Image (spheres, helix red, strand yellow):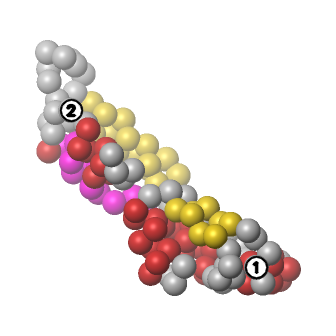
Amino acid sequence: GEQSAAGLLEDWPPYDPVFDPIDRVFLPRADIATETLVAGLIELGWEVDDVTAYRTVRASPPPLMASRVSAGGGFDAVLFTSSSTVRNLVGIAGKPHNVTVIACIGPATAKTAEEHGL
């Protein structure tokens, strides 16, 4: 199905005390993650241990050469693994050259890429 929190919830079973006597889900995730998955799991009857496992931060700006390579078409392709990677790359290095192939891991990332003109 869809590679997202909503897609995961479509396949996630409701809590069943006979099938699974432990009603808890451990959910390590980013500090900027949406509440979709937590809310959906709770709605399905699960108790959620929601833990911030990592913090998403923008990297230091690259050397001038990296910015020029990105803008000048020095990459054949760029694979974005999340919406934050789209925002961060565009924020620190600018948009890749228009001949660069842009690939995205899922529909939410693709939407963010499109919103940034990619």
Residue type, mark 1 in image: Gly
Give the residue pinned by disc 2: 13
Residue 33, position in %: x, y?
39, 58
Give the side of residue 74 with respect to residue 2, left or right: right
In the foreground, 48 or 7: 7
**How many numbered marks appear?**
2
Residue 40, position in %: x, y?
21, 48
Specify the segment rendered in magenta. Answer: 32-42
Give how far apart the Cα atoms at labels 1 and 2 are. Answer: 46 Å
Res 73 label: 1
Asked which quadrant contains residue 100, the reply is bottom right
Residue type, mark 2 in image: Pro
Give the side of residue 116 with respect to residue 71, left or right: left
> What residue sits 41% from the left and 72% below the top?
111
Label 1: few (<14), some or many (≥20) within 10 Å?
A: some
In the foreground, 16 or 79: 79
- Magenta-colored stretch includes residue 108: no
In the foreground, 22 or 108: 108
Quadrant, the C terminus: bottom right
- Magenta-colored stretch includes residue 33: yes
Could one spot residue 56 in this view of the protein? no
> What residue sits 85% from the left and 80% below the top?
65
Could one spot residue 83 in this view of the protein? yes
Give the side of residue 52 with respect to residue 62, left or right: left
